[in-house]
Amino acid sequence: MSSDYNYDAEGQFFPFFMLTVVSVFTLPLTYNVLKASEELEQTGQRVESDFKPKDADIIDAQRRKQKRKERKIKRIIAVVFGWAAMAYLGWLVYNSEQTRPQLWDPYDILGVSRSASEKEINRFYKRLGIKHHPDKAKPDESKNETMQTINDRWVEMTKAYKALTDEEIRNNYLMYGNPDGKQGTSIGIALPKWMVEEGNRYFVVAFYGILLGVVLPYTLGSWWYGTQARTKEKILHASAANLFREYKEDIEEEGVVNALSVGEEYKETIKSDAGAAKVESRVLASGVLSDAAKAQLKSLDDPTQRKTACLLWAYLGRLDLGDAELEKEKYSVAPTAFLLNNSLSSMTLPFQQLNPLLATYHAAQNLMQAVPPNGSPILQLPHFTQEVAQKITGTQSKSPLNIHKLMALPPSIRRSLCSALSDSQYDQAMKVASQIPYLKLEKAFFKVIGDRVVTPSSLVQLIVKARVIPPGTPEKDIPAVKPADLEDKDPEEGDVDAIKGRKKEKDIQPPLAYGPYFAADHAPRWHVFLADQRAGRIAVPPFTFTAFDKAPFNADGSPTFNMITFRCQFQAPPQVAGFPFTMHLVCDSYIGLDSKTDIVLDVRAVSEADVVESDDEISEPEEDSLAGQLQAMKGGQSQPQKRKLKKIQAVESSDDESDTDGDESDTSATDTETEDES
């Protein structure tokens, strides 16, 4: 038996093969391109505002440039070409003439019925011999018949006759589908024959060599090294190494800003020798930097780093550089610096130092709002310049005046302080202020699911209760806090998803951060962490939240005043004691709206938890119930009353030992008076 390889000389099957190959790559790419984006910046709503900064055209151009980097342009082009190729191949498949293989059928060749007996087949074969035998049949010239045609036809009839009458030949037909027995194997290859012809085979080999030896390794290598070259914060590893060398335990916000200039990403967009002296002279003469920051800036030797630092300070000070290219560079450095700052925040966590972490969080706020460190928080509002802010804060006390305090002033006093603004400018500023999602901390406490006290090394949850109350909301419009909203009920025993923290309801994302000078979209993050304020160290690392469990705003933009809950789970200390902490609630997008409160983690002994659990046993039946009467008939009333008395005493003793004055679900002493951080 021999094998015969047949190529697709007529191009009948090759389009099917190519259509399958192209669809394998095109369909997954199409899904990747068309699926809804999961990026928070692509799904959030925006704060409504008609304010346009002076350089709005440059800022919008930079935002479009940032979005183009995220649009998967190469994938979109590949999808377009893929669907075009699939359409062409589909057209070829539809219009190609299909040749179907003919099965060898002796009944069809002889023209007899399949139910015919052998006797009938013999009789019919003899009749065919009279008509079609080569000795009797003559070629029909009208049908272009020849003697060879007649001979071939009679041979086929003879084979068909023997396949139906001869036992051995019939067995060959039944087993192999052919009266001659087992035939050679014919293998069809869905490739055009010209690809294997003598003159073209070298080109085909070269094509496959380039595809598999050059294009595929280059593509995989570019993807692999591209992913390995960046950290999870989406910055280069070289930039992360430079940032690590800039970390200091006493670093402050100004030091963070200068440290953010070490990124390798800037070398792709900033020309170190173009206008560097001009930018530096304007920054040093502006008064934005302190003396220490100026000295640190002058000590930088790398020209790109030095110019980048100057551009960052020019951005934070909203300085006019008087050059279009310099203005583009000024607004382009902020989004990159924001990513670098996120990486620097992560680097501070292993050191457990509080001040460096807060410095990076506050630097993120400064970058988002284009406000220098120690600048007035009211500069976040539209049309508020340094001159307007100085005029307003000059009439106030030395404590920083943030947006919340400004909006808390009576409307007449607030308008008189903002007399430098026109009515339309003032209205725009107040409209933006009323949409800022300021989280007012209502309560914070610790709890352990299923227990009433926190025991050593248990999994404890920090429960934070807060409401979104936009600045300027009248007190009469703010509903009172319901005691039930401040409680946190344990999930049902059978609700495994709730116990493991798998939410069934979809969280609600707040509006995107309002930053008219920031050339990128950003979804605000809230960081919750515990710190030992006296030691200046982080006790529990930050938990980051990007969405709320309840809607903060109605469809018309008005606040809902829903009680929002944040849950932070960690392991309790192994010692039995009271641990005083300061809980920080910090937003990375707005200045001066952070909150902190003192809170005590009261870790009790396991024996105390056992006492509390014994109180939850099945209670005795009531005296006036049927079960109570049966109990009285059996053993009298003294035993139930005695057990009930013991239960009351146990509860009272447990209440006396507890230093909490909240409800029974509270497991720690908390001070819910919040302090606004400037």
Image (tube, grey):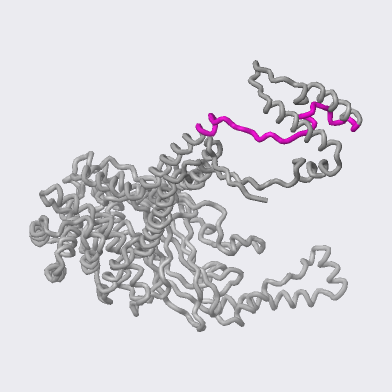
Where in the figure is residue 429, as x and y percent of width and height?
Answer: 26, 45
Question: Observer-nearest residue: 590 or 411?
Answer: 590
Q: Is residue 394 visible?
A: no
Residue 150, quarter of the rendered image: top right
Q: Is residue 128 above or below residue 487?
A: above
Where in the figure is residue 657, as x and y percent of width and height?
Answer: 55, 79
Q: In the displayed image of the protein, which residue is found farthest to the front?
A: 135
Q: Is residue 10 above or below residue 73?
A: above
Residue at 11%, 68% in the rendered image = 298
Question: Observer-nearest residue: 229 or 303?
Answer: 229
Residue 403, quarter of the rendered image: bottom left
Left or right of 107: which side holds 580?
A: left
Report if residue 102 lies within the magenta region: yes
Where in the figure is residue 124, as x and y percent of width and height?
Answer: 85, 26
Where in the figure is residue 501, as x and y percent of width and height?
Answer: 55, 62
Residue at 49%, 36% in the rendered image = 89
Question: Observer-nearest residue: 105 or 538?
Answer: 105
Q: Which of the image's four quarters has the C terminus? A: bottom left
Report if residue 499 lies within the magenta region: no
Q: Is residue 367 visible?
A: yes
Residue at 56%, 74% in the rendered image = 453
- Which secondary structure is most common in the magenta stretch? loop
Residue segment shown in magenta? 91-118
Question: Observer-nearest residue: 565 or 111?
Answer: 111
